[in-house]
Amino acid sequence: MRLANQDLLKNQNYIGGEWRDGASAIEVRDPANGELLARVADGSAADAKSAVAAASAAFPAWKSKTAAERAAVLKRWHQLILENADDLARILTLEQGKPLAEAKGEIAYGASYIEWYAEECRRAYGQTIPTHNPAMRLSTIRQPVGVVTCITPWNFPNAMITRKAAPALAAGCTVVIKPAMETPLSALALCALAEQAGLPAGTINMVVGSDAPGIGKVLTQDARVAKFTFTGSTAVGKLLMAQCASGVKKMSMELGGNAPFIVFDDAHLDTAVSACVATKMRNAGQTCVSANRIYVHEAMHDAFVEKLRAAITELKVGHGCDEGVTVGPLIHRRAAERVNDLVQDAIAAGARVELGGDFLSHGENYFAPTLITGVRDEMRIAQEEIFGPLAPVQKFSDEAEVIRRANDTPYGLAAYVMSENIRRANRVVEALDYGMVACNAGVFSTTVAPFGGCKESGIGREGGVEGMAEFYETKYCCFGV
Ligand code: NAD
């Protein structure tokens, strides 16, 4: 891989300020063509133990720094990421597949968490509480929780790390990160820049490893760990929550979704179509907030489907580094096969493929951007998280009915409402059982607002002031006078 700054390409784990080899190696491949990009040290559960020990040893000194001192280091890290943004985006596209423009967007978005939390940590205010007893004085202080461990997915290999590590480090915690095995190069490049920025040895540690269950046990159960934070599937999240229970670890879970996208008959058609394409086809549909069930009012259905078909036809599929490409490959063959299974299941149950619906000849991980109509709630396509470039459309006829159907899922991450009627928009936004609702918008995630879900989509929030609170312990102090 050719980069302007070749020092960003790391193939060892980063533990206690040292780059360490593993007993064996993990192959990192370009999902677009299977090309071998790198071999990265395969870290073990023992490496995870060393990383937790290093983070624990580094914690007292890091938490004792002033907020301004921690902020200065984090701002250097942020600056270095911006200076290396083109290289970081190239690494990301090559190992993950998303188009280069999206990768650049992710690098800027990921970096923005570091800048924002570097500023926010200066405001870790406590309270003075009006006392209940004249002989006592009451107050609270906020202190970092301690060692934080993180497990992150491959779909946003940069931002899912900074969204956790930035507030944790800013609060005065030290971190151990296990990135996804598919995308370790983006993660290790972030560590290389953290080291260059001057984050002290042990404050940030990274262990890439194929033994996810073994490493996961250490990160959820080691007695020195105070908090565990996870982004990934609901199934793995449940397992890790159970592991956290034995030590009563604090935890945050950003899990899967099954987002409804509701188009009312009073929606602005072009706004609804462009929002739908943005949320559905970004990252080839591999985002947790991707529209998963598109409900269109029967009066709007045919016009919406026609415009959506035209918009999807304009997408350009190919290698993410090629000019003009808007949809890349899926992460691996298994993912493409899963999307195909969902299409076949829907066809067998009576749905109709309007566009796409098959693998593409570009490479074995490609699936065509697909539009399906005649979908019903009981089909697998509407019950499961699709995680692919597949837009399934269903009809509805009234507001109460669509709210009931939209909420009828164990998930509760993101939902979308398209309506120009402000009264209806308010009513429906309030009635949806989701952690986040976007009205007349398709892309909404930002550093300054709380991201997260309810029900089986997770616990806790990332971003905004809520995202920082996750890494503080509030201590109540009572003084007799
Ligand atoms: P995944 O759960 O398979 O993997 C996520 C991470 O967990 C990876 O690092 C993996 O190595 C690790 N892992 C897997 N099994 C493990 C185990 N037994 N013990 C410890 N670690 C283990 O998910 P994925 O396929 O990589 O990512 C896609 C999922 O992530 C989707 O469900 C998506 O909705 C979700 N996601 C959620 C958010 C959010 O903010 N809510 C954001 C992005 C992705």
Image: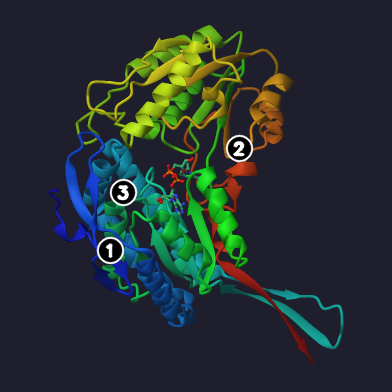
* Secondary structure under the numbered disc 2 in the rendered image: loop
In percent of width and height, residue 12 lies at: 24, 63
The quadrant where residue 394 appears: top right
Give left or right: position of 131 versus 152.
Answer: right
Cα separation between marks 2 and 3: 26 Å
Residue occupied by mark 3:
183
Residue occupied by mark 1:
193
Give left or right: position of 65 versus 38.
Answer: right
Q: Amino acid at mark 3?
A: Thr
Residue 151 visible in the picture: yes
Task: Looking at the image, tell me whether mark 2 or mark 3 is earlier in sequence order.
Answer: 3
Q: Quadrant of the C terminus?
A: bottom right
The quadrant where residue 419 appears: top right
Q: Amino acid at mark 2?
A: Tyr
Q: Nearer the viewer, residue 42 or 433?
A: 42
Tell which tag, 3 or 1, sits nearer the viewer. 3
Q: Residue at x 38, y 17 (%)?
A: 311
Give left or right: position of 181 versus 386.
Answer: left
The quadrant where residue 124 appears: bottom right
Residue occupied by mark 2:
411
* Secondary structure under the numbered disc 3 in the rendered image: loop
* Secondary structure under the numbered disc 1 in the rendered image: helix
Cα separation between marks 2 and 1: 36 Å
